[in-house]
Amino acid sequence: MMTFFEKQTNPLDQAHHMGNLMVDNMYTSGTAGKKFFTHLKENDTFLASRCKKCGTTFFPPRLYCEDCFIEIPEEDWKEVPAQGTVRLFTIATLNTFGEKLDEPKVIGMIDIEGTDGAMLGYIETDETNKDLIGSKVKAVLREKKDREGTVKDIRYFQVL
Amino acid sequence: MTRKVCVIGVGNTDFNSMTPDVSWKEFMYEACKKAYVDAGINPREDVDSFITCAEDYWEGFSIFDEFVPDQIGAVLRPCCTVCGDGIQGLASAYMQIMTGLVDTVAVESHSKISDALSYGDVVLHAMDPIYEKPVAGQVERERFSGPSYPEKSPKPLVGKTDEKGRVHPYYIAGLEMQHYLRSTKTTEEQCASVVVKNKRNAYDNPMADYECSLIEDDVMQSEYLFKPVKELDISPLVDGAICFVLAEEGVAKNLGVEPIYLNGFGYSSETPWFSSRGMDAGYATMASKMAYKMAGIKDPKGAFDIIEVDDRFSYKELQHIEALGLAKPGEAAKMLENGELEKDGKLPTNISGGSLGIGNCLEATGLQRSLEIVTQLRGFAGKRQVKNPEVGLAQSWRGIPSGTGAAAIFSRYPEVKA
Ligand SMILES: [Zn+2]
């Protein structure tokens, strides 16, 4: 049929030596990250930080404005609801090995309310053919007792 | 007198989905040797400085720089790695030559991605580890808890089904393509035409690996993998190596080779935060503005006889043409429909076949595009030769999830006639 379907694509069929990288990393949360996730552990809302000079409200919150290149002090942090609007979405069908996922996943870029930022996250919906753009969604969080202070505490976004 | 920098030699391997017969060193040697023969020089004496463009994770080495000198002729010579696209390497070479410290610089870049068995995970690993990467899912394994390695050391990822739950990071392209289609009123069918054009162009490029005769329906009927990105919208991975030899123009005159001038270049990076960054290829706009200014080009429309832009996903070709200021938002698809992007059109685009037709060679993409421009300007492009081109533009992007791009302007003259 098509030429590119006939190519050899499994390099493991050829003479080779195996190798891999045994590497684990931890990533320091940072001052801003620690504040955000400590808050999320105890509350059902998000934190954002606002640059006084240009007015940009960063989400996820940051200690500095990348545009003005100045620090954002503590008093310019604010609490925002854990909800937003779907700016974009896609339906992912493959895993990192290029194989089919057990179930397709709807992933969205969610504009977080009261901020100029957004976050990537799963959208729980039965209607995969529906145009979700502009839909209001809210973050479904883990039960408070199960929260560990990572982004995984945000389980998914639910269409309101 | 101002120094002028030109290309005096190019060399490359074929581009293939796999290269099981040669090691990464052997095929880098092949590309470099061809470039040195093309320029008529001996690298052990005539090249003053060597640059490789590579990224450790693609290569599967720590400190890949150390594995480079022998196969490019650089043992015990000034040699360094630019961790970026090949055009960023050309920019470094240009600047080295302009200092007057060196006259001749070799720039090499390659993809041996068929050796990388964890491509999707390497790409995923390029995302913010705290807020963004975990969205795709994480490898759950024994926590590393002390200075010595844990007793139950993690098993290699290959072949373990329970470790395959992470979403392929190309979902980012699905989001971005949706944004492009909506904001410019471009259609999926028009993006399909990019695939048809580039895979057809690749038939006339002997080094391309993914040439194919398709119609738009074939593309439209291919499966949605990251809706609206379909299987055939994605450029497949390819192996290949390319080497450029740049020199001060006096070197070209002494060697008697016809110089192709590097008249301008630029590069730019978006913020890495998806939460804050634009989705309109701002990196390409800024990189090209820098290049136009350097080359003295006031209006890019009509300035180029041929362009090669990054098309790692079909929509990217159209998005990049617009970001480069060569079409208004939404008009690139109309140019394509009017035949303007064909070999005999007003703005021949990706006549090489692009990444869709040749294959995605990662950090070597910028050099692959530059190679086509230089080959065309020299008049050596054979069946795909554009009629008498004088000025060309090569543009590249570092791929998902990066927001970095570069552009380079080449011509047959020391100054571009604006
Ligand atoms: Zn600011």
Image: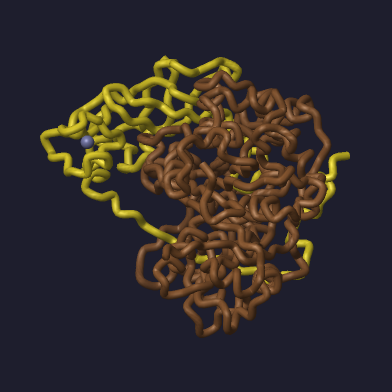
Chain colours: A yellow, B brown
Q: Residue at x 27, y 44 (%)?
A: A33
Could you tell me residue B205's position as x and y percent? 78, 50
Q: Nearer the viewer, residue B161 or B261?
A: B261
Q: Which residue reaches farthest right?
A: A1
Residue A14: quadrant of the picture: bottom right
Q: Nearer the viewer, residue B246 or A10?
A: B246
Could you tell me residue A62's position as x and y percent? 25, 41
- Residue B403 visible in the current orientation: no
Q: Quadrant of ligand 1?
A: top left
Q: Nearer the viewer, residue A142 or B369?
A: B369
Q: Is residue B199 left or right of residue B317?
A: right
Q: Residue at x 67, y 42 (%)?
A: B350
- Residue B170 visible in the current orientation: yes
B148 to B144, vertically: above or below: below
Residue B347: quadrant of the picture: top right
Residue B199: quadrant of the picture: top right
Could you tell me residue B250's position as x and y percent? 54, 70
Could you tell me residue B79's position as x and y percent? 49, 75
Report the quarter where the N terminus of chain B lies.
bottom left
Q: Is residue B32 left or right of residue B167?
A: right
Q: Residue at x 27, y 30 (%)?
A: A46
B275 to B389, vertically: above or below: above
Q: Residue at x 55, y 83 (%)?
A: B75
B48 to B304, vertically: above or below: below
The mark total stands at: 0
Q: Is residue A63 left or right of residue B292?
A: left
Q: Nearer the viewer, residue B159 or B295?
A: B295
Q: Which residue reaches farthest front?
A: B1
